[in-house]
Image: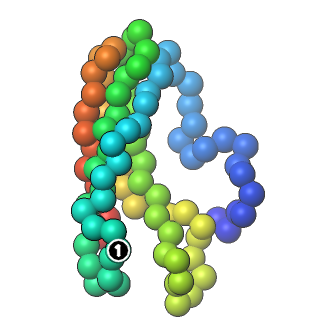
């Protein structure tokens, strides 16, 4: 939970018969107040030759928490199915 080093495998690590590329990360604002909202968008593209499923995940970390928090907290995820060459935009609105 408070690991400062690199994990051997990322959370949700698994094998796939295709590859995915993440691009065009967009934030609705550059800074967020404590009571503010933020929308995060990213485009996921299947760059491989086979159809596949990907789980896009959003992790956050508070810069100066009042109490000790984990280095990364999962605040959203979405499973998407993509054909070869297909792209989809994934939107997260962490609470």
For image coordinates 52% across by 84% down, the residue present is: 65
Height in image: 66 above or below 16? below
**Relative horizontal placement of residue 80, taking residue 18 as reference (left or right):** left
Residue under pointer 1: 31
Give the quadrant of residue 78.
top left
Bin the neighbour count of mark 1 within 10 Å (Cα to Cα): few under 14, some 14-19, many 20 and up.
Answer: few
Quadrant (top left, top right, bottom left, bottom right) of the C terminus: bottom left
The secondary element bearing badge 1 is classed as loop
Q: Is residue 75 visible?
A: yes
Q: Residue at x 47, y 22 (%)?
A: 19
The reply, left or right, for residue 12 in relation to residue 58 is right
Residue 5 locus on image (x, y percent): 74, 57
- Quadrant the N terminus occupies: bottom right
Front position in the image: 66 or 12: 66
- Identify whether 77 is placed above or below 88: below
- Residue at the far top in the pictured view: 49
> Which residue is more in the foreground, 25 or 71?
25
| Relative image position of residue 50 (x, y in whole percent) | 40, 11
Q: Is residue 78 visible?
A: no
Tell me which corner region of the image, top left, top right, bottom left or bottom right, holds residue 94: bottom left
């Amino acid at each position: 939970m408070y690991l400062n080093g690199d994990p051997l495998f990322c959370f949700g690590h698994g094998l796939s018969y295709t590859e995915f590329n993440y691009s065009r990360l967009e934030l609705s604002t550059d800074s967020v107040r404590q009571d503010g909202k933020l929308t995060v968008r990213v485009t996921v593209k299947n760059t491989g030759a086979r159809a596949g499923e990907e789980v896009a995940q959003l992790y956050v970390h508070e810069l100066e928490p009042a109490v000790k928090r984990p280095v990364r907290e999962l605040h959203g995820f979405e499973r998407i199915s993509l054909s070869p060459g297909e792209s989809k935009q994934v939107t997260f609105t962490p609470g």
